[in-house]
Image (cartoon, grey):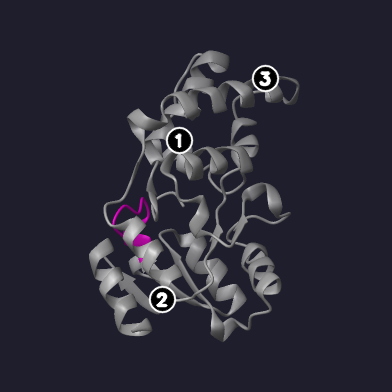
Amino acid sequence: MDGTLTQTNQLIYDSFNHIAEKYRGKTFSVPEITAMFGPPEEGALLNVVSRTQLDEAMTEYLRFYRENHSRLAKLYPGIKDVLRFIKQCGRKLALFTGKGIHSTSITLDEFGIRQYFDYVVTGNDVEKHKPSAEGIHKIMSNFHLKPEDVLMVGDAVSDVKAAQESGVKIAAVLWDSYSREKVLQMATDEVFHDVAEFHNWLRGQFE
């Protein structure tokens, strides 16, 4: 989701720092925050709040996330066209995100894209988070798919590693990747630098 479908990184950084400032009286740099990515928000927030404060902090995090969504987040131009095209071609579309279920739901609803996905796996739905392939395995099991039937699309090192672990092909999309240079050094099946380029490639595959 983040960095692939939606430009939500700034919203995530600001939401996290809103909690950090409230509970720790400090803020963190972008590299410091991205280093905490992997588990859903609850795991990241435990770096700045205690377990007894976690429920309260999550409520505040989600309040800030929702209230600032329209100001700080947007869909990448052309993404809805890509999602619509994939569905029109009769392909199954699943979302595998490290985000928690609540922030995922907010973003899906705010952007009106929930209806495009046949299955959603969030960070709360797996025991092992990216770069583990558990989420991909759940998707393949749900649709009774073999690895050769699947293409994963992602922007992060953890996406590439998860795809490689599961044996599925990986298309690296780098229009807003915070780990762009590292991803470019990895073995991927396809690399796309903008949404239009990816959409054109899909047309060649499906039409």
Residue bearing the label numbered 3? 56
- Point 69% across, 78% down: residue: 144
Note whether 140 is above or below 98 in the view shown: below
Kind of residue at badge 1 = Ile
Residue carrying label 1: 12
Q: Earlier in the sequence, mark 2 or mark 1?
A: 1
Residue 183 seen in the figure: no
The residue most toward the front is 88
Spatial CA distance of label 1 from label 3 is 18 Å
Q: Which mark is residue 188?
A: 2
- Identified by mark 2, the residue type is Thr
Q: Residues within 10 Å of mark 1 (few under 14, many from 20)?
A: many
Is 147 within the magenta?
Answer: no
Residue at (39, 63) in percent of width and height? 84
- Label 3 and label 2: CA atoms lie apart by 41 Å
Question: Front-most of 100 and 53?
Answer: 100
Q: Quadrant of the C terminus?
A: bottom left
**Residue 27: horizontal and vertical position, in percent?**
44, 23
Q: Residue drawn at (58%, 16%), measured in percent from left and top?
A: 23
Q: Position of residue 105 (x, y in %)?
A: 56, 42
The image shows residue 123, relative to residue 145, as above or below, that is above
Which SS class for mark 1?
A: helix
In the picture shown, does residue 69 fall above or below 199? above
Say which of marks 3 and 2 sits in front. Answer: 3
C-beta proximity under 8 Å, tags 1 and 3: no
Residue 189 location, quadrant: bottom left
Residue type pointed to by label 3 = Glu
- Determine which of the numbered discs, if any, sits on residue 25 in the image: none
